[in-house]
Amino acid sequence: MVVFALAIAVGACADPPPTATPDAVAPLPRFPLTGPAAGVEQAILMEQLVPRWDPGPDGREVVDDFGQNTQPLEAGRTVVVLSDPIAFPDGEWVRVYVPIDVTRTPGDFYAWLPRTLDGRPTLRAVASAACPREATIKGLARLLQPDRLRCAGDGEITMDVRTWLPVWYSSYEVDPSWYATTDRRRSVAIFDPGSDPFGRDAPETPERAGFWIDARVPPEVGEVPLGMIVRVTGRFGDPTANGCTRRREPAMAALGPPGAGLPDEAKADSIEWCREQFVVGDWDVLLGPEGRPIELAAPQLLRSAWLDPQPGVPVACGGVGMPMLTMRIDPTRVDPVWIETPDGARSLARFGHGFTLQLEPGPVIVATNGVTLVDREIVDPDRGKPGLMVCPEGYVVEFGVDPGQGG
């Protein structure tokens, strides 16, 4: 069951405080971890290496999606070592998991790499990560994916996190599909909100936080709202992982001949990959996007401070070719404003601080220059409307006050 913190509405609550106060949230009980002291074995590539497929080091080289060129891993990449070395005529080989690297591809797959090649070392062992002694998003998000399961185990834990859109895109289709990021309603990035979660320097996105976990949300669990401080309960090693399978996406597999692209994944590897995901079992909103508990009588908007006009500083944004946008407003929801597009997709609506959501008469979003937005109003993402700046970015549509025009 999904719940959210509902405060008693009083007149003074209509004006949100700039940041959350320590008394706004009940303390989170400690969740000690009793697992191993150190994580999995890691190594760094000392030179560019081409990984090979299963069943062993004599398997096929990993090639691009078109089957034309090998896909080497650059020097400096970190890999997780999964096996003892196996001797082959050209050197010693080990089985590895290649984590995602936001700056370099490919990643997120299992393969073989040489530890030594023609008598020279090619992998340099590095110290394993130290396992945290308590389950917190700050401690677990910093770990490589396999270490999160190793350090936290498969017991249920609860963490206070900030939420946003997932960052990574899975290299494979996953069955069950909610283990992947293809449906962004079933995945959510959770990250450390910092000591002042809505202060000037607070991270609004996982990339700004630096470390995060893309958590998985099963169909029976309600969609986790974004841009809020949420107490999530879940686990690594969820039992549903035992039926997990990862396959190459059909559209990518069709680009080249059989064997092109990332390796076919063994069933055991798929199960282990899914076991390493954090699966949300329940959640509770502690603070809404304006830094205060949820109150149905004083709804809150997702905020984007960069859209707030500054004297003498022009605001400009680039967008994507989005279709017409339909504003949706429902004050009974924990996230009362969103965007619908003609194809049935849904995007987040984020506003500068010059906007408020008023219930009477309404509901209506009102800007300081008098421009308004109402439920089911259609907005042209390229032209906006007088007094309104629109920055369409696909999954996020941002709205700012145009200081040069009135409503």
Image (tube, rainbow, N blue to C red):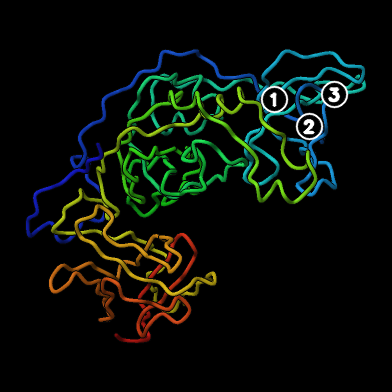
Quadrant of the rendering where the N terminus is positioned: top left
Query: Which amino acid, mark 1?
Result: Val
User: Residue 51, labelled with which disc?
Assistant: 2
Front one among 356 and 96: 96
Tell me where residue 369 sits by quadrant: bottom left
* Residue occupying image coordinates x 78% and y 45%: 64
* Residue occupying image coordinates x 52% and y 70%: 319
SS at circle 2: loop
* Residue occupying image coordinates x 24% and y 58%: 300
| Circles 2 and 1: CB atoms closer than 8 Å | yes
Pick whichever of labels 2 and 1 is earlier in the sequence. 2
Q: Position of residue 134 (x, y in %)?
A: 38, 22
Q: Position of residue 165 (x, y in %)?
A: 45, 50
User: Residue 96, labelled with which disc?
Assistant: 1
Label 2 to label 1: alpha-carbon separation: 9 Å
Classify 10 Å Cα crowding around label 2: few (below 14), some (14-19), many (20 and above).
many
SS at circle 1: strand
Q: Which mark is in front, 2 or 3?
A: 3
Label 2 to label 3: alpha-carbon separation: 11 Å
SS at circle 3: loop
Q: Which residue is mark 3?
A: 58
Q: Position of residue 9 (x, y in %)?
A: 9, 54
Q: Position of residue 3 (x, y in %)?
A: 22, 41
Q: Please determine whether, in this image, residue 73 is positioned above or below residue 365.
A: above
Horizontal side, residue 201 vs residue 272: left or right? left
Pick whichever of labels 2 and 3 is earlier in the sequence. 2
Pick whichever of labels 3 and 1 is earlier in the sequence. 3
